[in-house]
Amino acid sequence: MKVIIVGGGIGGLATAVAFHRRGRQVEVLERAAAFTEVGAGLTIQPNGLRALDAVGLGERLRAGGLADPPAGIRGRRGDWLVRNDAEDLKRRFGAWVTVHRAALVDLLRAAVPPEALRPGIDVRHVHPDGTVHHSEGTSTADLVVGADGVHSVTRRSLWPDHPGPRYVGYTTWRFLAPPQPVKGSAETWGSGERFGYVRMPDGRVYCYAMANAPAGSRIGLDELRGRFAGWHDPIPALLGSAREEAVLQHDTYELPALPAYVRGNVAVLGDAAHAMTPNLGQGACQALEDAVTLARAVDTLGVRPGLAAYDSARRPRTQQIARRSRQAGAAAHWTSTPLTTLRDAVLPLLPYALFDRSLTPAYTWTI
């Protein structure tokens, strides 16, 4: 069996690893000139680590250093709106790991035969029969996997009438701050904007900020510092230590639900299938789940039955998590003063079990 994978990011490389470990011939077509990843930090939650365990890489990631689960949500003055029991979360669900995106890509890439990696290939169209047209000609395979991101060519080829990704109304900045004494991780909500930070194993701090803005807005570091100047420590210090060239800004998109994740001999996974808001931090974890589930189903059942089983298993779960992710961050982007005042007053009074129920389905996945 030959498997062509379109896209060499986290989801695509994880798919290549999963099929390669099952003895299948894989070929990864990546548009970029090299297999690498731009970005900053990435938290792999317990379900993502279990997916990596399925391809023999979980312990290698854990060896780089464990992280604490998110401590909760704070108001801009530092008061707690939602407080998690980090030790209870670790006891019930397992470990969290924070890693640089490029380091995870390197780990996955090293587990794929070098001859299977084809950078600099621009895929133009994918047919349901497993034919792929690209900048170097045409390739065919028993199975094609579209792991080519939110603006997926594979998805557009198979479902040309689907509306495609939609902008959710806020833009996101990410950067790594130099090592400094912060504890754990937390997210802070204001009025139409928020800021989060996570300590990396090497002492650096992965930071992200989000703010309501028209699509295509570009806001520099000085303005970003001004937005959060009055927020609680250590937010001003983290922004103060950032370098302009290290701050990445991307508009935030999500994908309206697809009617299927498979067509013919082709499947889509990761952001190509279910791009979601980052509010639950589950985007990469769901791509890893997709990869190992797809490889196991096809290896066990064959291509067409395996694809049907993959779609049946993954589409309801990922679309549910995408909905929960959208809902989880909605209140952070309210701009009405009465609404945000009410939010900040009510959230601390709600039972923790209410928040726990929204997290449990994501963390408890097993292959």
Image (tube, rainbow, N blue to C red):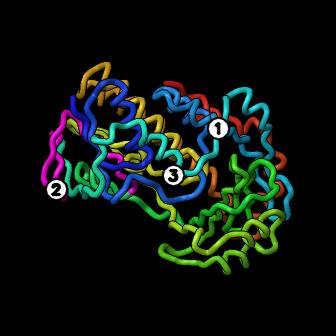
Residue hosting label 1 = 359
Vertical relation: 127 (above or below) 314? below
Amino acid type assigned to the residue bearing label 2 in the image = Glu
Q: Position of residue 154 (x, y in %)?
A: 27, 50
Please report the residue visible at 38 percent of the width from the left and 46 percent of the height from the top: 273
Residue hosting label 3 = 102
Please report the residue visible at 33 percent of the width from the left and 37 percent of the height from the top: 113
Which residue lies most toward the top here? 300
The residues tagged by marks 3 and 2 sit, at their Cα atoms, a distance apart of: 27 Å
Residue hosting label 2 = 136
At label 3, counting other C-alpha atoms closer than 10 Å, the crowd grade (few under 14, some 14-19, many 20 or more) is: some
Query: In this view of the protein, can residue 239 be seen by the observer?
Result: yes
> Which is more N-terminal, label 2 or label 3?
3
Amino acid type assigned to the residue bearing label 3 in the image = Ala
Vertical relation: 366 (above or below) 345? above
Amino acid type assigned to the residue bearing label 1 in the image = Leu
| Residue range highlighted in magenta | 129-150
The residues tagged by marks 1 and 3 sit, at their Cα atoms, a distance apart of: 27 Å
Magenta span contains residue 134 = yes
The residues tagged by marks 1 and 2 sit, at their Cα atoms, a distance apart of: 44 Å
Q: Quadrant of residue 332?
A: bottom right
Q: Secondary structure at mark 2?
A: loop
Image side of residue 281 versus residue 215, left or right: right
Q: Quadrant of residue 140?
A: top left
